[in-house]
Amino acid sequence: MKTILFTQGHASQRAVVRLARAAFSHADLRVLASHCDDREDILEGADEALVEPARPDPRAEGAPHAEWLLDRARSLGVGAILAMRNRTALVEARETFAAAGIRVACGATSREALETCERKDVFAARLREAGLPVPETIAVVDEAGLAHALASLEGAEGGVCVKPASGVYGRGFWRLDPNADAFAHLEDPDRRVVHPGVFVSGYAQAREKGRLVAMEYLPGDEYSVDVVCDEGRLVAAAARRKTGAFQVVTTRGPEVDLAAAVVAELRLDGLVNVQTRADARGRPKVLEVNTRYSGGIGYSAAAGVNLPAIAAATLLGVAAPRDAFGVEEPRAVRIVDEPVFLPRTSARLAAGPPAQEQAA
């Protein structure tokens, strides 16, 4: 029987663990999951749950965490690890894990690739040099740089946008629209549209000027491509496009082809996410790579593509279930929020506060 460990990730770790567990019989696969918090909702789907070290424990970060994880994996007979935390330290320890017979996937096979994907300006330059399509991107560190970038991008077919050079979830993204009302971004901040003059003025007055990128804005369809990859080789992918209240899932097309080229160029590894968006002529360009699984990984599974199961099989060197590759045509998927009962937490609440709290 093979054993895989999914270390602490985002809330979608729950979906990853449960989808991998559901695809195999208990005789064929043992699924472990770990987290440093008491995340009963995430860990309940695993065959066994582990507690990861948390701060101030020195094993919570960097090389000490890699040593702790290696020791625990050895003792539990783990054959593969899909890692989310401390990936830089773990990617540098890949050979040590391999010598112990443990395949560890951290999103990429090198520290350089992980760091490239964290910096949007460096990422765009790297892919452009490789001949892959990316939006025109200019790094900004001060007011003069912002003025230069906006002047250089003037006349861009889709307009201009700005965002932090590092960050996730679209935080700090703004599209600059000279026709926008100066107050529009406060009336409707969710539109993420601001007048250029307002943005420039605000940036000039910022106490701390974070590193930004100014980019040509791409007005076409945006795709989130979830990818299983094996040291630079695309194994399986599902591209998701938002359209109104649902998402459309496909497994082929130019976005998947582009994701495969990015995977090969950066030697991505594990279960990652590639973001693309089309320009005004409908040509997809690469926006960014998240060297981790996405929050929407469950969408593709609902359409019939069980990427966590495929990832587990790939990392362990076994055959993936045939029904894991289920999309024959575009499929529409909609997510529905579902409350989760927490029996252990409920039992603690029913028992009342600990004795020391009662005494106090």
Image (cartoon, helix red, strand yellow):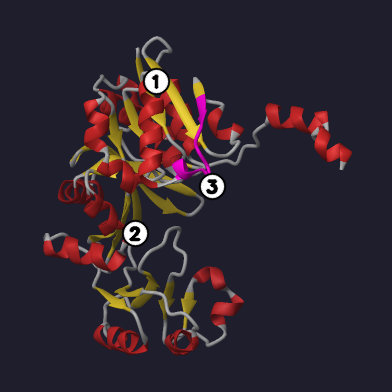
Label 2: which secondary element? loop
**Residue at the spot x=43%, y=12% of the render?**
26
- Which region shows up in magenta? 49-60
The answer to whether residue 213 is left or right of residue 53 is left
> Picture coordinates of residue 213 (x, y %)?
33, 73
> Picture coordinates of residue 145 (x, y %)?
31, 85
Residue under label 1: 75
Mark 1–mark 2 CB contact (< 8 Å): no
Q: CA distance from mark 1 to mark 2?
A: 47 Å
Residue 346 counted in the magenta span: no
The C terminus lies in quadrant:
top right
Q: Give neighbour class at mark 2: few <14, some 14-19, many 20+ (Cα, 10 Å).
A: some
Looking at the picture, tell me which residue is in the foreground, 181 or 339: 339
Q: Amino acid type of disc 3?
A: Pro
Residue under label 3: 56
Mark identifier at residue 323: none
Res 143 quadrant in image: bottom left
Res 183 quadrant in image: bottom right
Residue under label 2: 221
